[in-house]
Image (tube, grey):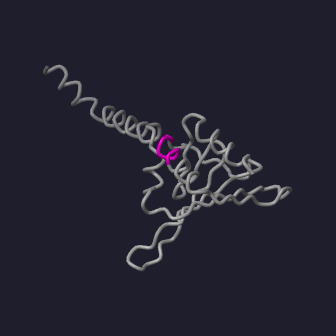
Amino acid sequence: MSKILNVLKKKWMLFLLLAALFCILLYLFVPRNLGTLADIHDADIQKITLYGVFLDDKEGDLIIELTEAEQQKFLEMMKKTYVFRNPIDKEYTEDDFGYFFELARKPVNRDTVPPLVHYFTEDIISVDGVQYRFYGDAFEEWFEELVDRD
C-alpha cells in the first residue's frame, strides 16, 4: 500500500491529467437524450412547424404544419433519439438543405413564451448553438417519411 502512495505522490500531475482527459471524453461521447436536451415537455407544446431551407434556392422553402398525431409522434421520436456532442462543429453550408423545427409553447401566467427553434440536417442537430450527432437512423428515417407525405 505504501508503494502505491509513493507512486501517487511522485506522479500526481500525471494522474490529474489522465482524470481530466477521462472527464472530457465522457463529456463528449456519452449519449444524451434529445427530448431532455431540447427541453421538451408535452404539456407545454401547442404547435410544431417544420421549415425546410434549401440553400441552393432551386426548390423554394418547405413548410410542414404537423397534425396532432404527427406532433405526438415527433415528440416521441425526439424522446427516443440519443445524440452525442459533435467535437468539431460542422459548417451548415456543406449540405444543400437543412431544416428548422419550431415548437410553439403555451403562454405561462399571461407571459408570451418564445418558441424553441432548432436547426438540423440528416446527421447533426443544433440545440442552443451546440451541435450534436444522431445515434442511429431512426429519427432521419421517420423524418424522411414525414417530408415525403406531401
Residue 81 in the image: state x and y as whole percent.
51, 41
Vertical position of residue 44 compared to residue 31: above or below: below
Residue 146 in the image: state x and y as whole percent.
67, 47
What is the quadrant of residue 67 in the picture? bottom right
Based on the picture, tell me whether residue 142 belongs to the magenta stretch: no
Residue 8 in the image: state x and y as whole percent.
23, 28
Residue drawn where x is 25% and y is 29% of the image: 10
What is the quadrant of residue 119 in the picture? bottom right
Residue drawn where x is 58% and y is 51% of the image: 70
For this rendering, which residue is in front, 42 or 53?
A: 42
Residue 76 in the image: state x and y as whole percent.
50, 46
Residue drawn where x is 51% and y is 44% of the image: 85
Residue drawn where x is 58% and y is 44% of the image: 88
The residue lying furthest to the right in this view is 58
Based on the picture, tell me whether residue 80 belongs to the magenta stretch: yes
Quarter of the image with the N terminus in it = top left
Magenta-colored segment: predominant secondary structure: helix
What is the quadrant of residue 107 in the picture? bottom left
For this rendering, which residue is in front, 43 or 97?
A: 43
For this rendering, which residue is in front, 12 or 97?
A: 97
Specify whether 128 is left or right of 3. right
Q: Which residues are magenta?
A: 76-83
